[in-house]
Amino acid sequence: TQLLEQSPQFLSIQEGENLTVYCNSSSVFSSLQWYRQEPGEGPVLLVTVVTGGEVKKLKRLTFQFGDARKDSSLHITAAQPGDTGLYLCAGVRGSYGKLTFGQGTILTVHP
Amino acid sequence: ETGVTQTPRHLVMGMTNKKSLKCEQHLGHNAMYWYKQSAKKPLELMFVYNFKEQTENNSVPSRFSPECPNSSHLFLHLHTLQPEDSALYLCASSQMNNEQFFGPGTRLTVL
């Protein structure tokens, strides 16, 4: 079983602070995806990183894929209350039909 | 309707009941998925259908029975469930080997 360890599980911060969420595995993935899920909704894909060492930016969110394609991080700059939600990483091996999800990070940003 | 829809959104059932969850995708995709999301556990893939054919059964107990009559509709038939089956059941769809789009989920409570 390929496991994705996501940390921290919970993060409660004030508006304007920076934060980083980590996703680590002992397995190599062909790519890694980050999702955000709000209460009462399904996960929504934020980004897919494919190349080892790749960095992608989405406004205040920066995603990085480790050189060995076993780990990834999500960094949020100047967090806002609208960033509150559950952040999930998912490793992709081969077909996109098989995703291995991390446990998720529940982020709460207080005004 | 657009995207992926799921009904009902909430379901409470006894252990002896039989019920069905419905998923419909309006995206023209040819692959559909059932996932289980429990508290404190990673999202678990249950079943995958490609072009109406089941291609993945992730060791799911037989009390969960999927049905895919066409590429746009997916059902999950439930019977004699256990309290530990209480969870959020998410449906997703994709074009083969591409991004998965999730529905809002059905919150299931088994009494």
Image (cartoon, coloured by chain):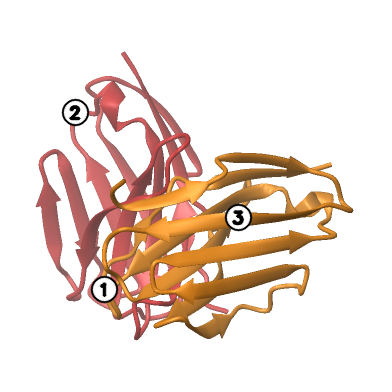
Q: Quadrant of residue B26?
A: bottom left
Q: Position of residue A85 (x, y in %)?
A: 39, 35
**Front residue of A51 and B78:** B78
Same-chain check, marks 3 and 2: no
Q: Are marks 2 and 1 in contact (CB under 8 Å)?
A: no
Marks 3, 2: nearer the viewer: 3
Disc 1 or 3, which lies upstream in sequence? 3
Marks 2, 1: nearer the viewer: 1
Image mark 1: chain: B
Which residue is located at x 73 percent, y 39 percent?
A: B12
Q: Position of residue A36 (x, y in %)?
A: 34, 45
* Residue B105 to residue B27: above or below: above
Figure chain in orange: B
Q: Is residue A64 visible?
A: yes
Residue type pointed to by label 3: Leu
Say which element carries label 2. loop
**Disc marking residue A78:** 2
Horizontal relation, residue A60 to residue B24: left or right = left
**Front residue of B111 and A24:** B111
**Front residue of B25 and A103:** B25
Q: Position of residue A90 (x, y in %)?
A: 39, 64
Circle 1 residue: B98
Image mark 3: chain: B
Q: Quadrant of the N terminus of chain A?
A: bottom right
The residue lying furthest to the front in this view is: B69
Residue type pointed to by label 2: Ala
Which residue is located at x 34 percent, y 86 percent?
A: A94
**Neighbourhood count class around disc 2 (C-alpha, 10 Å): few under 14, some 14–19, many 20 upward:** some
**Disc marking residue B27:** none
Same-chain check, marks 1 and 3: yes
